[in-house]
Image (cartoon, rainbow, N blue to C red):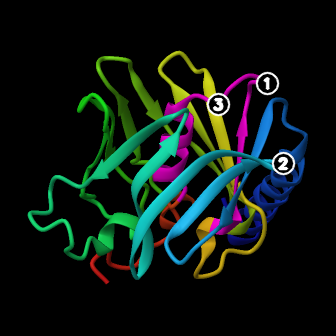
């Protein structure tokens, strides 16, 4: 394929991505918006109804540490770091060997979800394991840049559990621009909220090509 043909192909793909991004509000099911409520706190809301409260810390980027949804509290742990107050910089940038994230139900002490890896350098590396033995989720990306990307959560049977996009051009507070579409009219499953919280950063890290240690 010649240079002009490649440029035309990329342009067509970018147009397709913009169209899919624009169609996002019309997806069936419930649509949640993320809003910032404090220096380190966000909420997923459906209209005026609060579906989840997200607590975190700032390590150059916001990192979730506690998620409250469905009447339960879940702690997000990063087992690879000996010191939990250390600097997991590659966590939200995404790296070739990303630190895992473990999500634990505070009331039972059981692990409900495990984030194995992250997207990086145009490679879809992110993988979430649903515990105990409830399968895995992968996250295909359809986008030419973060602001026209739609990220889907797909299980081994090809079922889509949710989709994500940014409502507008990402800023340094990009998390408050996250929109979540869930193909259900009923209650939102905690797995969806937790998974969306952990993987939203992949819409940025997927397009990073510099050294993940930077």
Q: Which residue is mark 3?
A: 188
Left or right: residue 123 compared with residue 186: left
Instruction: Say few, some or many: other residues with alpha carbon within 10 Å of mark 3 (under 14 / 14 to 19 / 20 or more).
Output: some
* Alpha carbon distance from label 2 to label 3: 14 Å
Give 38 or 118, whichever is nearer the viewer: 38
Question: Mark 2 touching mark 3, by CB under 8 A?
Answer: no
Residue wearing tag 1? 185
77 and 70: which one is in front? 70
Provide the secondary structure element on which disc 1 rests. Answer: loop
142 or 40, which is in the foreground? 40
Q: Residue at x 38, y 42 (%)?
A: 74
Q: In the rendered structure, which segment of residues is drawn in magenta?
A: 176-200
Mark 2: give few (<14), some (14-19) or many (20+) Cα within 10 Å.
Answer: few
Residue 1, percent from left and from top? 66, 58
Residue 145 in view of the camera: no
* Residue 191 falls inside the magenta stretch: yes
Residue at mark 1 to residue at mark 2: CA–CA distance: 13 Å
> What mark, if any, has residue 152 been given in the picture?
none
Q: Give coordinates of residue 66: x percent, y percent.
A: 40, 53
Dot 2 or dot 3, earlier in sequence: 2
Q: Residue at x 74, y 22 (%)?
A: 186
Q: Secondary structure at mark 3?
A: loop
* Secondary element at tag 2: loop
Report the Cα–Cα distance between label 1 and label 3: 8 Å
User: Is residue 145 located in the magenta-colored stretch of the structure?
Assistant: no
Q: Nearer the viewer, mark 1 or mark 2?
A: 2
Q: Is residue 94 above or below residue 181?
A: below
Say left or right for 97 vs 94.
left
User: Going 12% across and 68% down the picture, which residue do you hit?
Assistant: 83
According to the picture, the residue beneath numbered tag 2 turns out to be 47
x and y percentages locating residue 149 in the rendered image: 69, 57
Quadrant in the picture for residue 8: bottom right
């Amino acid at each position: 394929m010649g240079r002009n043909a490649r440029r035309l192909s990329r342009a067509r793909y970018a147009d397709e991505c913009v169209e899919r991004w624009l169609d996002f509000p019309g997806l069936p099911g419930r649509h949640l918006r993320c809003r910032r409520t404090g220096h380190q706190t966000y909420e997923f809301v459906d209209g005026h109804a609060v579906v989840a409260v997200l607590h975190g810390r700032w390590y150059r980027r916001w990192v979730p540490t506690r998620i409250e949804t469905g009447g339960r509290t879940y702690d997000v742990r990063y087992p690879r770091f000996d010191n939990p107050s250390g600097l997991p910089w590659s966590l939200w940038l995404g790296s070739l060997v990303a630190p895992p994230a473990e999500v634990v139900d505070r009331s039972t002490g059981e692990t409900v979800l495990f984030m194995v890896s992250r997207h990086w350098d145009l490679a879809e590396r992110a993988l979430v394991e649903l515990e105990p033995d409830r399968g895995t989720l992968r996250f295909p990306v359809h986008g030419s840049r973060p602001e026209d990307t739609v990220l889907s959560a797909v299980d081994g049977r090809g079922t889509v559990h949710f989709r994500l996009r940014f409502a507008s051009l990402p800023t340094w507070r990009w998390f408050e621009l996250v929109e979540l579409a869930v193909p259900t009219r009923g209650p939102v499953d905690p797995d969806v909220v937790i998974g969306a919280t952990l993987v939203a950063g992949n819409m940025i890290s997927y397009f990073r090509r510099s050294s993940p240690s930077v």
